[in-house]
């Protein structure tokens, strides 16, 4: 199957924070892959910007080293690399000072798409937005790309949105949630709204419950100071899991258009019920032989921040009334695995002598490690042994079904950056969505703080605290196995 790569319009992309971790690990390798695939037109330019004292050659050396570190050798052919580096330049500047802005203005063209990626801490977003306009660098159609965290709570998210809105219209603000750039997440929309098969069953009448898991096997070392102030609820649930929940639960938008999709997601967040204290399980990983504990990782022996959280949610609307959505996410768990599972109900009456649970179809949508979907269906066991039923998966692992093309699919960052250049905001969070998600999150956090709840310890390499399993056992259900 031939891959269709449509080049984007000529652009100038400025990466503020170009010497930082995110730029080196994700943004620059992603841009290089798009370049190799022929998606970057000849006139496209990338301008790194940061305070580090570098000239263009020094920055090119940094880019070369980043690509070497984060892309396997066959993915960085020398000729392509040399051609890519010709597109790259650098501007030394300070977001908080006057230095460098005039030089940046001299590097930016007015007749191409202008995009400014704020790959810096959120405390600099306001300075960057203001100076871009103040120095007349950003034209009327210029886009800015901002990274999470979008605030720490509703108040700070509102302040951040107001700061950006003072300089850029909402239609030019791209809030990245890389989960939305994943192939499978977009496939969830294709599956639901591009087929007849699932949508009629996608409701409380036929769905028993939904599980959303984002499990990580690593700890928080390296970003301990940030994480200890955030915790799993702020770092993962308020944004990534909430976005997955929205795409799973939303009504069909009238068209595949940024505001139509985001309006429907917003309605889901607004329909979420408050969470009862008994429907929340928070955990914190302990240490083990050779494995530091959470408290050691963050350097805070008294920390009561959660590195794991499981929640039981309900959505108060016609489609989902009474259907629980179970969410869990955590660090240092048994496996790195992210998935959404739609557990359908059993047939209302079994004509076969089958055990309980048989015939309850299960659709799982895997985000990582290997993106794909599978649907558990019940069939007759082949052979002459009578009418015995078995469950088999209808597997649709993309790499197997679609061959090399799927294995080579752009990663989430690449896809999203190209969407920014195209001017397509469908897979980016709108300001009101972010605020609605905080408006739901804040009382949950305030509740456990007021009660003085402490996170439950769990063993590294486990599935989290035992109470997370009990959360489902109580409802006569269980979590899907955590396996890579
Ligand atoms: P980082 O490694 O600390 O890099 C920060 C960058 O900002 C550096 O290039 C630094 O370069 C530059 N910088 C700092 N102060 C500046 C100033 N006053 N003026 C101009 N540039 C300045 O951070 P990061 O991990 O790349 O994260 C960047 C953003 O992405 C943060 O908002 C973070 O929360 C978010 N994010 C990161 C990840 C990730 O995986 N890393 C994931 C999700 C979200 P100089 O010191 O040379 O100025």
Image (tube, grey):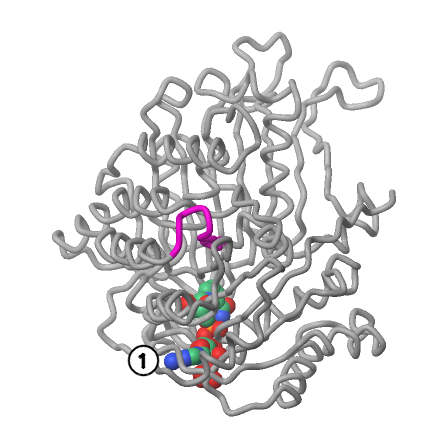
Instruction: Examine the rendered structure and indicate whether residue 376 appears above or below residue 116.
Output: above
Q: Give the residue at x 61% y 85%.
A: 59
Can you identify the residue that label 1 sits on?
299
Residue 17 highlighted magenta (yes or no) = no
Instruction: Examine the rendered structure and indicate whether residue 140 appears above or below residue 382.
Output: below
Quadrant for residue 108, please give it. bottom right
Q: Give the residue at x 51% y 77%.
A: 104
Q: Is residue 298 left or right of residue 18?
A: left
Measured as percent of width and height from the top left, residue 137 is found at: 47, 68
For the residue pair 124 and 194, the one nearer the viewer reads as: 124
Measured as percent of width and height from the top left, residue 203 is found at: 47, 20
- Asked whether the viewer can see residue 289, the reply is no
For the residue pair 138 and 66, the one nearer the viewer reads as: 138
Instruction: Examine the rendered structure and indicate whether residue 310 appears above or below residue 72.
Output: above
Which image quarter has ligand 1? Answer: bottom left
Quadrant for residue 361, please give it. top right
For the residue pair 452 and 105, the one nearer the viewer reads as: 105
Q: Give the residue at x 60% y 54%.
A: 421
Q: Which residues are magenta?
A: 168-177
Quadrant for residue 318, please give it. top left
Measured as percent of width and height from the top left, residue 213 is found at: 48, 47
Q: Quadrant of the N terminus?
A: top right
Residue 172 highlighted magenta (yes or no) = yes
Secondary structure of the residue carrying tag 1 is: loop
- Asked whether the viewer can see residue 443, the reply is yes
């Amino acid at each position: 199957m031939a891959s269709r790569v449509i080049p984007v319009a000529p652009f100038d992309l400025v990466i503020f924070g170009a010497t930082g971790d995110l730029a080196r690990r994700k943004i620059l390798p992603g841009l290089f892959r798009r370049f190799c695939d022929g998606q970057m037109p000849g006139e496209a330019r990338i301008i790194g910007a940061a305070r580090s004292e570098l000239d263009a050659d020094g920055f090119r050396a940094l880019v070369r080293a980043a690509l070497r570190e984060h892309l396997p050798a066959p993915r960085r052919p020398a000729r392509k690399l040399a051609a890519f580096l010709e597109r790259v330049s650098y501007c030394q500047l300070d977001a908080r000072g006057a230095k460098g802005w005039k030089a940046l203005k001299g590097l930016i063209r007015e007749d191409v798409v202008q995009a400014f990626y704020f790959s810096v801490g959120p405390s600099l977003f306001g300075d960057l937005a203001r100076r871009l306009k103040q120095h007349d660098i950003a034209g009327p159609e210029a886009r800015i790309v901002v990274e999470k965290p979008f605030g720490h709570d509703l108040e700070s998210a509102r302040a951040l949105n107001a700061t950006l809105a003072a300089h850029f219209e909402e239609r030019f603000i791209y809030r990245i949630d890389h989960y939305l750039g994943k192939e499978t997440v977009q496939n969830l929309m294709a599956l639901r709204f591009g087929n007849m098969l699932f949508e009629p069953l996608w409701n409380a009448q036929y769905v028993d419950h939904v599980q959303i898991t984002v499990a990580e096997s690593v700890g928080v070392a390296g970003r301990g100071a940030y994480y200890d102030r955030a915790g799993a609820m702020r770092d993962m649930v308020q944004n990534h899991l909430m976005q997955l929940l929205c795409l799973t639960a939303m009504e069909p938008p009238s068209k595949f258009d940024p505001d139509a999709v985001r309006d429907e997601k917003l309605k889901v967040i607004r329909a979420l019920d408050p969470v009862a204290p008994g429907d929340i399980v928070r955990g914190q990983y302990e240490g083990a032989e050779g494995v530091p504990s959470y408290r050691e990782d963050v350097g805070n022996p008294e920390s009561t921040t959660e590195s794991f959280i499981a929640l039981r949610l309900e959505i108060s609307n016609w489609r989902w009334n009474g259907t629980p959505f179970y969410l869990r996410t955590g660090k240092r768990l048994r496996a790195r695995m992210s998935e959404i599972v739609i557990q359908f109900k059993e047939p209302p009456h079994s004509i076969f002598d089958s055990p309980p649970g048989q015939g309850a179809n299960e659709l799982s949508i895997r985000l990582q490690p290997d993106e794909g979907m599978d649907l558990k269906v019940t069939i007759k066991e082949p052979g002459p042994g009578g009418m015995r039923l078995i469950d088999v998966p209808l597997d649709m692992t993309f790499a197997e079904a679609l061959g090399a093309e799927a294995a080579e699919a752009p990663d989430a960052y690449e896809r999203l950056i190209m969407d920014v250049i195209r001017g397509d905001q469908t897979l980016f969070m709108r300001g009101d969505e972010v605020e609605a998600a905080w408006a739901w999150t804040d009382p949950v956090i305030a509740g456990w703080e007021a009660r003085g709840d402490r996170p439950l310890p769990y063993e590294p390499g486990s599935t989290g605290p035992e109470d997370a399993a009990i959360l489902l056992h109580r409802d006569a259900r269980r979590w899907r196995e955590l396996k890579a």
